[in-house]
C-alpha cells in the first residue's frame, strides 16, 4: 500500500511539472496593433512577428501603415526590429525604428531613425497585446525642395519624442 501511494504521488508530481513546462510554450507569434505617437500626432497600424524565441530572449520584426494629421502627408511603411528580454508574458523591449515620410506632394521628405526602450506584454495564447516605449535618441533628417530653383536643401537634427503607446491583438 505504501508503494502504491508513493507511486501515485510520483506520477502526480511529474504530471504537474510537465504541465508547468508546457505553459511557457508560445503558440501564437503574430500580433497586429495600433501605435500612438504622442509627440508627432501620428498613428500607425502595424503587424509584428516573433522571428526567434528562446527561454529569455526573442527577436521580432514589424512593419505597418503610418498616418498623420498633416496635410499632404504620405508615409512609407515603418520598419522595426526589436529585442525582447524576459519570460513568458512580460518583456523589456530594446528596439530601433525607421520611418520615411513625404509631405506636400514630394516637396519635403522626413527620415526618422530612433532607438527606444520599453515594456511589452504578450499573452501566451491569443489575446491583448500592449507595448509602451520611450525613445533614447531620435535622429531626424529632413530634405526639402526649394520651389524657386528646384534644388533640395538638407537639414539634420536630433529631435525628441515623448513616448509611444501600442495596443493590439496577438494571434
Image (cartoon, rainbow, N blue to C red):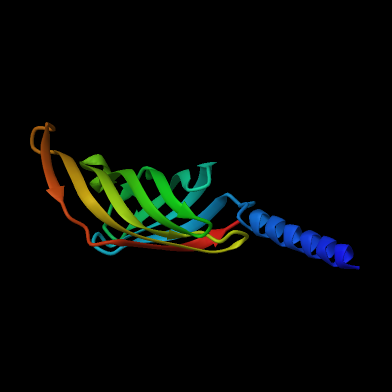
**Is residue 15 found left or right of 161 in the rendered image?**
right
Q: Is residue 23 placed above or below 54 in the rendered structure?
A: below
Which residue occupies 48% across, 48% down? 56
Quadrant where the N terminus sits is bottom right
Along the line of sight, the residue nearer the viewer: 26 or 56: 56
The residue nearer to you, when weighing 106 against 38, is 38
Expressed as whole percent of the image width and height from the top left, the position of residue 16 reads 71, 62
Residue 171 pos. (x, y %): 61, 56
- Residue farthest to the right, as pictured: 1
> Which of these two is toward me, 52 or 127?
52
Q: Is residue 4 left or right of residue 153?
A: right
Q: Is residue 114 visible?
A: yes
Q: Is residue 143 above or below residue 25?
A: above
For this orientation, the residue located farthest to the left is 148
The residue that appears at 65% across and 59% down in the rendered structure is 20
In the image, residue 66 lies at what x, y percent?
38, 52
**How many marks can you see?**
0
Q: Residue 80: name its quadrant.
A: top left
Q: Position of residue 150 (x, y in %)?
A: 13, 33
Location of residue 122 with respect to 155 vertically, above or below = below
* Residue 146 in view here: no
Q: Is residue 48 left or right of residue 138?
A: right
Q: Residue at x 11, y 44 (%)?
A: 157
Q: Residue furthest front?
A: 2
Amino acid at each position: 500500500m505504501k508503494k502504491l501511494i508513493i507511486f501515485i504521488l510520483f506520477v502526480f508530481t511529474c504530471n504537474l511539472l510537465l504541465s508547468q513546462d508546457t505553459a511557457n510554450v508560445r503558440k501564437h507569434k503574430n500580433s497586429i496593433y495600433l501605435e500612438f505617437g504622442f509627440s508627432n500626432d501620428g498613428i500607425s497600424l502595424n503587424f509584428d512577428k516573433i522571428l526567434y524565441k528562446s527561454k529569455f530572449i526573442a527577436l521580432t520584426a514589424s512593419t505597418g501603415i503610418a498616418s498623420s494629421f498633416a496635410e499632404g502627408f504620405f508615409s512609407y511603411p515603418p520598419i522595426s526590429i526589436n529585442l525582447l528580454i524576459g519570460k513568458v508574458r512580460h518583456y523589456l523591449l530594446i528596439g530601433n525604428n525607421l520611418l520615411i515620410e513625404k509631405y506636400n506632394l514630394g516637396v519635403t521628405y522626413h527620415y526618422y531613425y530612433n532607438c527606444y526602450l520599453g515594456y511589452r506584454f504578450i499573452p501566451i495564447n491569443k489575446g491583448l497585446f500592449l507595448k509602451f516605449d520611450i525613445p533614447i535618441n531620435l535622429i531626424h533628417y529632413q530634405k526639402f525642395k526649394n520651389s524657386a530653383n528646384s534644388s533640395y536643401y538638407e537639414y539634420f537634427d536630433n529631435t525628441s519624442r515623448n513616448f509611444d503607446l501600442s495596443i493590439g491583438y496577438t494571434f
